[in-house]
Image (tube, rainbow, N blue to C red):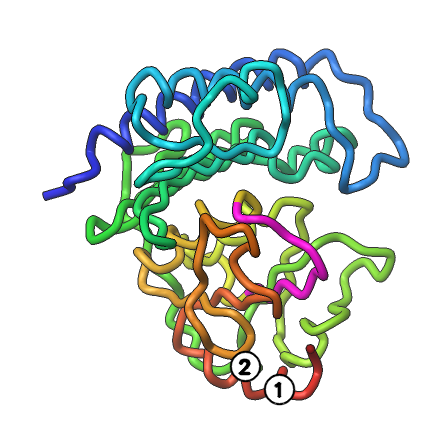
Amino acid sequence: MNVYEREIETALAAAADAGRHIMAFYEKLEPILGATSSITTQADKDSQDIILARLHSAFPDDGLTGEENTPLYLTLPHTGRRIWIVDPIDGTKGFALKVDQFCIMIALVENGEPLVGVVHDPANGRTTYAAKGAGCFAIDTGKAKYACKVSQTNRLSDAVVTKTHSKAKGKTEGLSSHLGAKGLYETYSAGLKLARIARGEADVYVNDYPTYHDWDICAGHILVTEAGGKVTDLQDRPMVYGTRSGPSDTGFMASNGLIHSEGLARLKGHFG
């Protein structure tokens, strides 16, 4: 039994509403060449307002955290026993460049732990969602809902690593370069990277950005763990959300679980 069924249904509906609005904007968008990862568009702000309004209507006692300081956001409660954490467009650079690499991320957290997560990829018609203890599922355009499971890859030398696009296209860099993985999947969206791992389409993702926020990873975290994978910081400690200091100060690794220890061992001494 999924005790978070109402929360999942509300988050999925909110993501779908926001996705339709975003795609209407996207279809008319002229690519913004030279867009940076920090770019914000009106679509980000509209998407967040659509999502937060729906969540607040359904769960008025919950806190709400978002990336954009819109007028609506400033009127809503930001604290509570439970907190919804929203990234209205994760991978805004991929959105602005018009390369179909962005998603909507919605998560529910209590006591620092993600309970619900939705990653909606409106450009490609792929939605991945999970709830604590209830598993991870995919809803793709033209297909019946199906359960997601991480891959069974048990050696890093056979693994597919996910990373952000860089000048060194097609090559790993930073901490990822120490993993020795065989395959590579590049996208501007952290949510899409984590969804790929949950779906068994990739094996490991290492984030070593000096600054990141709960909304960058929280929704994707529970997808991976409910699909049978593992997410920790780079010292193999649990990630904690909803605190002022953020989920971690050392970066993090998400994997299918089978290669997690090997990955952390390879990274030892290369960070912090």
* Residue at the extreme right: 34
Rendered location of residue 40, percent (x, y):
73, 28
Q: How far apart are marks 2 and 1 (CA)?
A: 6 Å
| Amino acid type, label 2 | Leu
Q: Can residue 130 be seen in this view?
A: yes
Rendered location of residue 191, percent (x, y):
54, 46
Rendered location of residue 215, percent (x, y):
54, 43
Magenta stretch? 205-214
Image quadrant occupied by the C terminus: bottom right
Q: Mark 1 points at which residue?
A: 268
Rendered location of residue 20, percent (x, y):
51, 15
The residue that appears at 31% across and 63% down in the rendered structure is 228
Instruction: Reply yes or no: does residue 179 show up in magenta.
Output: no
The residue that appears at 52% across and 70% down in the rendered structure is 233
Image quadrant occupied by the N terminus: top left
Q: In this view, does 268 lie to the left or right of 120?
A: right
Q: Is residue 47 above or below residue 159?
A: above
Q: Do the residues labelled 2 and 1 touch (CB within 8 Å)?
A: yes
Q: Which mark is residue 202?
A: none
Residue 90 picture quarter: top right
Q: Mark 2 points at which residue?
A: 264
- Foreground: 152 or 39? 39
Q: Is residue 179 above or below residue 197?
A: below
**How dense is the environment of label 2, judged by Cα within 10 Å: few (below 14), some, or many (20 and up)?**
many
Instruction: Reply yes or no: does residue 211 show up in magenta.
Output: yes
Magenta region's main secondary structure?
loop
Residue 221 picture quarter: bottom left
- Foreground: 75 or 191? 75
| Amino acid type, label 1 | Lys
Q: Is residue 255 left or right of residue 177?
A: left
Q: Is residue 217 above or below residue 174?
A: above
